[in-house]
Amino acid sequence: MPEILNKYTEIINTRLKELLDLKQVHPVIKDAMNYSVMAGGKRLRPTLNIMANALLSGNVRETLDIACAIEIIHTYSLVHDDLPAMDNDDLRRGKPTSHVMFGEAFAVLCGDALLNFAYEVMMKNALRHASNMDSHLKAMLEVATGAGVYGMITGQCGDIENEGQILTEAELKQVHEHKTGAMIKSSLLSGLLLCDPRQEYIDALTVYGNNIGLTFQIIDDVLDIVGDSKKMGKTLGKDKTSKKFTFPTLYGIEKSMKIAEEKTEEAVNALTIFGTRGKELTDLAYFILKRER
C-alpha cells in the first residue's frame, strides 16, 4: 500500500469490518458483502473524503462513516461492473470476482445490498450528529448525486453505449467525468461539506476533484495496455477486447500521459487557497499520476 494512503487505511478498514458485522442477515449476502468490500483495494475514495474534511479541521470520527459508505458504494459498482452483462470479468483486487464466488444472482443482490446499506450507514451517522444535520444532508446529497443518474450511472451508460464508437475528446471527457470523476469529486466535497465551507473552498476542491478524476481514468486506460496484472489485481487488455474508446485510443500513450500531467498540475494549483493544509491532497494527486507505472 502506498505510504500516502497508509495513514488512513487502518482506520477505514477497522470501521468497515465493524459496519459489516451484520446481524440477522442472510448468510450468503453477508459473506458476499464482506468478501467484496474486504478483498483489498487502495481505499482512495474514503481517503479523499477524510483528507478533504481535514482541510477545514473537521472531525475524522464524524466523517468516517461517510467515507466508509463511499467505499461501500464504490464496491457495489465494481461488483456490478464485473457481471457477465457488463464487463464480464473474473478477477478483481487480485481475487475472483463476486459472481465467480457466489453466482451471478447473489452478486446482483450483493451489489443491491451494498448500495442500500451505504445509505443506512450515512443516515445513522447523521442522526448521531444531529446538531450538524444540515451539513450531513448536504454531504449525503453530494454522495447520492455522484453515484446516481447525474454522475456514475450516466457515465456507465455512456461507456456501454460507446463501445466500438469513435469519440471526440469532449465526448470522451464527458464519459470519464461521470463514470469515474463524479464519485471522486463527491468523495472530496462530502468531507468538506461537514465543515460549512465557504463557496470558494467548494469551488477549489471541485476543480481539484474534476482534474484528478480525469487523471485517474487516463492512467487506468494507459495501465490497461502497459500495466502489470498482478500489481493491479485485475484482468488487463479489457478495453481493447470490449472495443472501448479511451484516451490512448485517441492520442496514444505518450500524449495521454502528457494530458494527465497537465491535469495533475491544474489540480494541485487549485489547492493553493488552502495553503500548507493542502499538502496531503497534493501528494495524493501525484500518487494518482504515477501509480503502478
Image (cartoon, grey):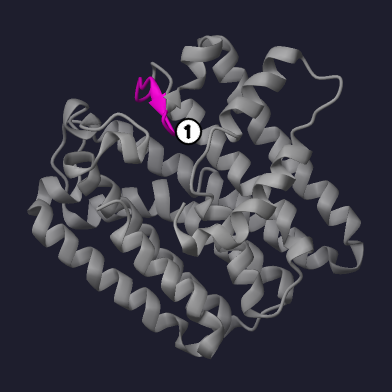
The foreground one among 216 and 43 is 43
Helix, strand or loop under label 1: helix
The foreground one among 221 and 156 is 221
Residue 230 placed where, x, y %? 32, 34
Q: Residue at x 48, y 64 (%)?
A: 4
Q: Is residue 220 left or right of residue 168?
A: right
Question: Where 23 sits versus 130, above or below?
Answer: above
Residue 96 placed where, x, y %? 44, 20
Q: Is residue 95 left or right of residue 146?
A: left
Q: Amino acid at mark 1?
A: Leu
Residue 265 placed where, x, y %? 30, 77
Q: Residue at x 35, y 20 (%)?
A: 88
Mark 1, residues whose alpha carbon is within 10 Å: few (<14), some, or many (≥20)?
some
Q: Which residues are magenta?
A: 86-94
Q: Which residue is mark 1?
A: 78
Q: Residue at x 38, y 23 (%)?
A: 86
The foreground one among 211 and 28 is 28
Q: Is residue 90 magenta?
A: yes
Q: Is residue 26 magenta?
A: no
Question: Where 151 sits versus 38, above or below?
Answer: below
Q: Is residue 28 left or right of residue 181?
A: right
